[in-house]
Amino acid sequence: MLQRLKDLYSHVSVHATADREHQAAVELLLIVMTIDHRMSEGELDEIRTISDDSGWESDTFSVDQYFGEAMAKVRAARAAGALDGLLDSIDERISNGVLRAALYSASRDVAGIDHQIAPAERALLMEIATRFG
């Protein structure tokens, strides 16, 4: 019985892991935003909207406060040619099934905010769908 309960709840985040998962989600959305080498205020605003609508903000986590650290991680991974490693890390940190299922849609919203989806964005979206869908 205990194992069945563990299996049922293994993909549900708890308060202790929610901040870590939301950090990973922000990192993913920043990868989407930067993959085409163009960043816009509209994309940042869309990430903030997704965060607000999804309830990621809490007493212990703020998307705006995390942007700098997350962007540094994304830039470092790009410079080192290690985006796949960062995507692996993001994948490992997000266990909440609802959040995982929402990541493709959120990523698509960020990529499409400028009404164009570049080939690099399209390829990344396909990877996100495969990993998180």
Image (cartoon, helix red, strand yellow):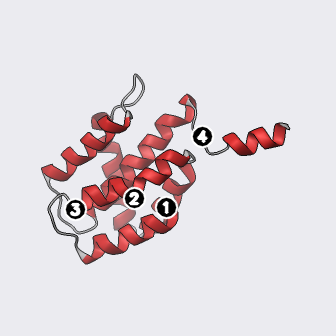
Q: Where does label 2 land, which residue?
A: 104
Residue 88 visible to the viewer: yes
Q: Nearer the viewer, residue 115 or 15?
A: 115
Residue 82 visible to the viewer: no
Please tell me which residue is depicted at 33% across the width and 57% down the height of the picture. 107
- Residue 87 lies, with reference to residue 99, above or below; the image says below
Q: How many marks?
A: 4
Give the distance between the C-alpha atoms of the residues marked 3 and 1, in whole angstroms: 18 Å
Kindly check if marks 3 and 4 are in contact, taking CB atoms under 8 A apart as contact.
no
Q: With 113 as the anchor, is 59 left or right in this view?
A: right
Q: Position of residue 83 (x, y in %)?
A: 42, 66
Mark 4 / mark 2, whichever is N-terminal: 4
Q: Position of residue 34 (x, y in %)?
A: 26, 61
Give the distance between the C-alpha atoms of the residues marked 2 and 1, in whole angstroms: 7 Å
Q: Helix, strand or loop at disc 2?
A: helix
Kindly check if marks 3 and 1 are in contact, taking CB atoms under 8 A apart as contact.
no
Mark 3 / mark 4, whichever is N-terminal: 4
| Circle 4 residues within 10 Å: few <14, some 14–19, many ≥20 | some
Q: Where does label 4 land, which residue?
A: 12
The numbered mark at residue 112 is 3
Q: Where does label 1 land, which residue?
A: 133
Question: Which amino acid type is marked by label 4?
Answer: Val
Kindly check if marks 4 and 2 are in contact, taking CB atoms under 8 A apart as contact.
no
Give the distance between the C-alpha atoms of the residues marked 4 and 2, in whole angstroms: 18 Å
Q: Helix, strand or loop at disc 1?
A: loop
